[in-house]
Image (spheres, helix red, strand yellow):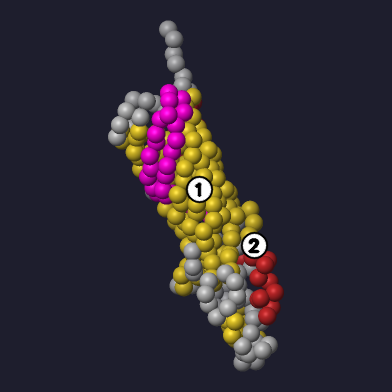
Amino acid sequence: MNIKILLFFLVSSILSTGTFAQSTAFGLKGGLTMGIQNWNGFDQDPLIKYHGIAFVESADETAQFSVFAQAGYHLKGSAIRNRNFLNPTTGNFFRPPAQQFIFKNASLTLGGKRKYDISNTAKAYYLFGLRGDYTIGTNLDEYEDLNELNGGLFYPIDFYVRKWNYGVTLGGGLEVAFGELVGAVLEFTVNPDFSLQYRQPSIANVRDPYTGQNRTISERTIRNITFEVTAGFRFLRKVEYID
């Protein structure tokens, strides 16, 4: 099914008056993000950062399925650690500090949860959501001098960053009630992107500082995937009908 059709049905379900005229749950959650990127077939080292999310979902106490919407801020990307580089000026190898490539993404996720009672106060669930991301900024300007030193686009640059991306969120978690209206959530999700975060076309006639000859820099593509561990608080807004 076309992703636009799926998004239409999810948005219609979540924003319909029939859904949120019922009781709803809302809250804040956050935690650790491990970002992984593949650069043209080469896996980079993981980037360990963080994320924060605000969410709202349907909360019919008799239903085992709910729909949700959440907006978040996620630091995605990758890193390079423990690799030797050649200084073209001195001819010596050196090992720089860990280099982090950070993409600061705002995201909107729409999806559903399937819940299972495991006790009077706790429920386990799994979830699936469609996600759209917008890249607010990066730290790639930190590597402009190193690009110049290496005589080409050895590192990514902001010009080829793709601002809009989309993917899915898959995972599961646990809801624990502290009382009638307050509880906690603990969650683990995997968040692969279907689209490319970065796409740099091949560039011809770039001078190689090591050989002095011109060469072609091949196309570079970067795609995100993150693993997130999340904890937070969940508040229930109950709607009661009185005859």
- Three-letter amino acid code of the residue under disc 1: Gly
Q: Quadrant of the C terminus?
A: top left
- Three-letter amino acid code of the residue under disc 2: Asn
Residue 95 visible in the snapshot:
yes
Helix, strand or loop status at disc 1: strand
Start-end of magenta stretch: 164-189
Which picture quadrant has residue 141? bottom right
The percent position of residue 177, horizontal first and vertical second, equals 41, 30
Q: CA distance from mark 2 to mark 1?
A: 21 Å
State left or right for residue 1 relative to residue 26. Answer: left
> Residue sitting at 65 percent across and 87 percent down?
88
* 161, 6: nearer the viewer: 161
Which picture quadrant has residue 209? bottom right
- Tag shown at residue 240: none
The percent position of residue 197, horizontal first and vertical second, equals 54, 61
Was residue 125 drawn as part of the magenta stretch in this picture?
A: no
Name the residue carrying label 1: 31
Name the residue carrying label 2: 139
Whether tag 2 and tag 1 are in contact, CB under 8 A, the answer is: no
Helix, strand or loop status at disc 2: loop
